[in-house]
Amino acid sequence: MVTCTVTSTGGSSQATSPHAETRQRIILLANQPRMFRQLLQRALARASDRQVILEVDTPQQAELLLEQVSAHWLLLSLGPTGEMPAMALRLMARHPHLSLLAIAVDRGRMEVMLARPGRPHRHVPLEDAGLASLLSILRHGEQAPEIIAAGGST
């Protein structure tokens, strides 16, 4: 069993069911450090409606939770040398609807992997990105100005 913190910013709490029909976005936070994850959770709760924010302490807990919940976004930390965690690549292969945002907080670097139905994920690396960029990407996905400006591989 996985313990997680749930924040809903509007709509029905049934959005955490993998079979629920909903327009709510489900965002799973599993990034480190914990203080930044909690700050991000609060910013997300204030910035948008119609979303459910799930928060777990480790990527391993996220992996278990994704077997029960159909999330739209997973936020993780990049590895110590800035690499995409191998577990994240496994999860995207297992859950093609899942978009991923991996963050290196200390370097302002993000690796975005956008889910696209029927096509491979779109990879967009971003440098010097801040909280506003992160919120914009989670809200607008491929249409976020940061994604459009960065181009990225298709």
Image: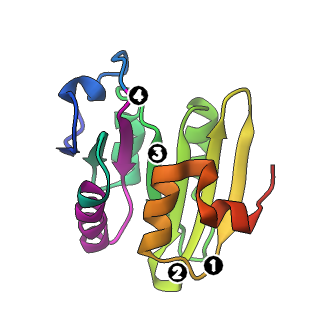
Q: Residue furthest right?
A: 154
Looking at the rendering, the stretch of residues picked out in magenta corresponds to 23-45
Q: Nearer the viewer, mark 3 or mark 4?
A: 3
Residue of label 1: 127
Q: Nearer the viewer, mark 4 or mark 1?
A: 1
Contact, mark 1 vs mark 3 (Cβ under 8 Å): no
Contact, mark 4 vs mark 2 (Cβ under 8 Å): no
Q: Can residue 84 be seen?
A: no
Give the Cα separation between the discs numbered 4 and 2.
30 Å
What residue do we see at 31% from left, 42% from top? 51
Contact, mark 1 vs mark 2 (Cβ under 8 Å): yes
In terms of sequence position, does the residue under pointer 3 or pointer 4 come before the other?
A: 4
In terms of sequence position, does the residue under pointer 1 or pointer 2 come before the other?
A: 2
Q: Secondary structure at mark 1?
A: loop
Residue of label 3: 73
What residue do we see at 73% from left, 26% from top? 118
In this rendering, would 65 be left or right of 134? left
In terms of sequence position, does the residue under pointer 4 or pointer 2 come before the other?
A: 4
